[in-house]
Amino acid sequence: MKILVTDQSGVEHELEGLDGWRTMEVIRDWGLNIKAECGGACSCATCHVYVEDGWFDKLPDPSDDEEDLLYSTLDKKPNSRLSCQILLSEDLDGMRVTLAPSAAKDSEAA
């Protein structure tokens, strides 16, 4: 399955992922600019993404922990999610996300 990821420079990348993988893992493993410091433990917000309309509503509701972490970011938007909490499935084939500025490896904001 594929996900379409727009990086912080506005370049879109078509990435191949596997069912059950975390979106963060796919983005990280393809070498895009994402910190993903906690490795998917939902204990940081360094894999912050914006999920495009039409895809956001297909996702399960965020946990309280995810909401708290997103609240701590400086660049939260209504369509913000942590990519470590988005598990890929056939329903998400073609999903589009944009990497948040705070997810960049060289970003100090989180």
Image (cartoon, helix red, strand yellow):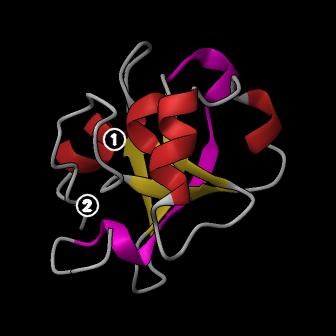
Give the residue type at disc 2. Answer: Ile
- Reading the image, the residue beneath label 2 is 34
Residue name at image x 44 percent, y 48 percent = 69
Q: Position of residue 72 (x, y in %)?
A: 46, 61
Residue 24, disc: 1
Which mark identifies residue 105?
A: none
Q: Nearer the viewer, residue 52 or 16?
A: 52
The spot of residue 51 in percent (x, y) is 65, 53
> Which residue ends up furthest to the top in the rendered image?
20
Horizontally, is 52 left or right of 18 in the view? right
Going from the N terminus, do you reach mark 2 or mark 1 first?
Answer: 1
Residue 83 horizontal/vertical position (percent):
44, 42
Residue 56: name its quadrant. Answer: top right
User: 28 and 65: which one is in front?
Assistant: 65
- What residue sits 36% from the left and 53% below the top? 45
Magenta stretch bounds: 88-104
Residue depicted at x 48% and y 83%: 10
Q: Quadrant of residue 26?
A: top left
State the SS at label 2: loop
Compared across the picture, whether 24 is left or right of 82 comes to left
Left or right, residue 65 beside residue 104: right
For this orientation, the residue located farthest to the bottom is 9
In this view, 25 is above or below 32: above
Task: Check if mark 2's residue and mark 1's residue have beta carbons within 8 Å.
Answer: yes
Magenta span includes 75: no
